[in-house]
Image: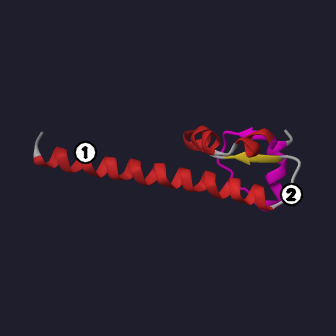
């Protein structure tokens, strides 16, 4: 490999590792919030690219109580419009 190709490869690996860690961190935070707050069910949405990865890392109890899982990025949806996406 050329030096520039090696540098690109290393950069790509670092970015993939960073993303993997963030996904794990998100799943841990969701599981912790759900453990700390009483709930019967909950809804989840995340972009298709990371949704399944997050869900796989949730604890079993969190997975069982998830009622709806949307493969959608709802980050720019106003708070008062969020539930509409889950009840369509």
> Looking at the rendering, which quadrant does residue 88 occupy?
top right
Count of numbered circles on the image = 2
Q: What distance separates the C-alpha of mark 1 from that of mark 2?
A: 45 Å
Identify the element where label 1 is drawn: helix
Does 8 sit left or right of 68 as displayed?
left
Q: Residue at x 40, y 47 (%)?
A: 16
Residue 36 locus on image (x, y percent)? 78, 61
> Which of these two is toward me, 88 or 1?
1
Would you say residue 76 is visible in this rendering? no
The answer to whether the residues at label 1 and label 2 have Cβ atoms under 8 Å apart is: no
Quadrant, the N terminus: top left
Q: Which mark is residue 9?
A: 1
Q: Is residue 39 magenta?
A: no
- First to last magenta residue range: 65-86
Dot 2: within a 10 Å radius of its alpha carbon, few (fewer than 14), some, or many (20 or more) residues?
A: few
Give the labeled residue for mark 2.
38
Query: Furthest residue to the right?
Result: 40
Q: Residue at x 34, y 52 (%)?
A: 14
Would you say residue 22 is visible in this rendering? yes
Q: Earlier in the sequence, mark 1 or mark 2?
A: 1
Does 40 sit left or right of 28 as displayed?
right
> Looking at the rendering, which quadrant does residue 49 occupy?
top right
Q: Is residue 83 magenta?
A: yes
Identify the element where label 2 is drawn: loop
| Disc nearest the viewer among 1 and 2 | 2
Does 54 sit left or right of 17 as displayed?
right
Residue 12 locus on image (x, y percent)? 32, 47
> Looking at the rendering, which quadrant does residue 59 occupy?
top right
Q: Residue at x 56, y 56 (%)?
A: 25
Residue 31 locus on image (x, y percent)? 69, 53
């Amino acid at each position: 490999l050329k030096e520039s190709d090696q540098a690109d490869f290393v950069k790509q690996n670092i970015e993939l590792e960073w993303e993997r860690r963030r996904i794990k961190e998100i799943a841990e935070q969701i599981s912790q919030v759900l453990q700390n707050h009483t709930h019967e069910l909950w809804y989840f949405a995340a972009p298709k690219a990371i949704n399944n990865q997050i869900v796989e890392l949730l604890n079993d109890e969190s997975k069982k109580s998830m009622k709806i899982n949307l493969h959608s990025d709802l980050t720019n949806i106003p708070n008062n419009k969020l539930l509409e996406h889950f009840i369509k």
